[in-house]
Amino acid sequence: MVKDNNFNLVIGENMKCVIKVGEARAQWWKSHMKSLLPEIEFYLHNELFDKEKIDFAIVWKPENGWLKTLSNLRCIISMGSGIDHILSDPELPKDLPIIKTTANDLKIRMREYVVLHTLKHHRNLNEVISARNNKEWKQIIEPPANKRTVGIMGLGNLGLDCARTLKSLDFIVNGWSKSEKNLDKINVFTGIDQIIEFIENVEILVCMLPLTHETRGILNIKLFEKMKKGACIINVARGEHLVEEDLVKAIDENMIKEATLDVFHEEPLPKNHFFWKNSNIFITPHIASLLDPEAGGQDIASNISKFINGEFIENLIPPGKEY
Ligand code: NDP
C-alpha cells in the first residue's frame, strides 16, 4: 500500500515511530501504542533503531537538536495540546507538520479547573478562609455572576469551551482571539487593536493562549494597568505568557488582587522562587488538564492513521505555523 498524504510524501509499509516522553511511563506508552497500531514498529528514544528509517516521532519536550537527527521523519506528534515545547528547538526541521493531541478529557479537566478557580476568585474564597481561620463570622457579599466580567484570552479548543461554560453560569464573558468570530452571548474582541476594549471591564482574566512570538510576555504590567483595579488573573496556558516580576509588582500596588498560576517559566517551580511566599498567588503544579494516557493514545493512533491515509486531521499544524 502506497499513498500520498497532503504533504506529497510517499509512505510505504513497515513504518516506524519513535517515542520520546518522560522515563516513568515510556514503556507503557510503547506497549499502548503498539496495541493500537500493531502494523507500526515502535521504539523508545533510548533503544537501538535506525534513525534514517523513522517516519513518526511522538514527543514531549524533546531536547534541542534531536528531531533533526531523524532524517526521514514525516510528522511530529506532540504528546499534549501545546506545540511550543517542539518549536523552541532552534534546529527543528522547518518542513515538518506537527499534530497536537487533544483528547476529549483534556477539555473536561480544563473546564473544571477554570470554573473552580474563577468561582474561587469571584466569591473571594481567600478572604472567607482567612476569616474562618481567625474565628471571625464575616459575611462577604460579592456581586452575582451576571454583574462580573470574565475575560478569556484565546478562544480555541479549550478557551471557547471554558467561555461557554462560564456563560452558562451567567458571567458576562469577553473573549479575545486572533481572528474574528461571531459567538452567541460571548463578546468577542479581535487582535491587538481591540485588546484594551476587551480588557477594560474584566475582573477575572483567564489566559488560554498558545505560546507564540506574539503572545510571549502578554501578561505584563501595561496590560494590568488597563484592567479594573483589584482584578484577578488565572494562567493555565504557559509560564512564559506572564512577566513574573510584573505580577508581583501589580499585586504589591493593589492593581491586581490575586492570581492563580498553573504554569511557570521553570517547572517544577524552584523552592526559592518568590511566588511561593506571596499569599495572593495560588500555585498549582501544572495540573489544570493533564492528558489521560488511554484517551491520548487513541487520539494519537487515530491521527497517525489519518495521516497515513491522507485524511483531514483537525489538529494538524502545518510547517511555519505556531499553533
Ligand atoms: P488553540 O490553539 O486551540 O487556541 C488558541 C486560541 O488563541 C485561538 O482562539 C487563537 O485565535 C488565539 N490566539 C492565538 N494567537 C493569538 C494572538 N496573537 N492574539 C489573540 N488571540 C490569539 O489552543 P488550546 O485551546 O488547545 O490551548 C490553549 C493553551 O492551554 C495553550 O497554551 C496550551 O499549551 C495550554 N494548555 C495547558 C494545560 C495545562 O494543564 N495547564 C493543558 C492543555 C493545554 P484564533 O481562534 O483566531 O486562531
Image: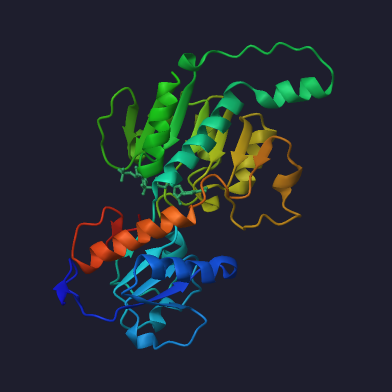
Q: Nearer the viewer, residue 65 or 75?
A: 75
Residue 301 in sight: yes
Of residues 3 and 251, the one nearer the viewer is 3
x, y percent for residue 109: 49, 41
Q: Is residue 77 above or below residue 129?
A: below
x then y, percent, for residue 157: 36, 43
Q: Quadrant of residue 267?
A: bottom right
Compared with 220, 280 (above or below) is above
- For residue 151, above or below residue 285: above
Residue 121: x, y in percent? Answer: 60, 27
Quadrant of the rendered image containing residue 107 = top left
Q: Residue furthest right?
A: 135
Determine the residue positioned at 71% across, 10% down.
139
Regarding residue 81, the answer to whether it shows in the image is no
- Across and down, in percent, residue 275 comes to 70, 46
Question: Which of the 4 quarters of the picture holds residue 250?
Answer: top right
Viewer-nearest residue: 48 or 5: 48
Q: Quadrant of the C terminus?
A: bottom left
Residue at horizontal 45 percent and vertical 39 percent from the top:
108
Quadrant the N terminus occupies: bottom left
Q: How is the image coloured?
A: rainbow
**Left or right of residue 20: residue 104:** left
Drawn side of residue 143 relative to residue 201, left or right: right
Residue visible at 66% across and 29% down in the picture? 254
Q: How many labels sit on residues?
A: 0
- Residue drawn at x 63%, y 49% is 285
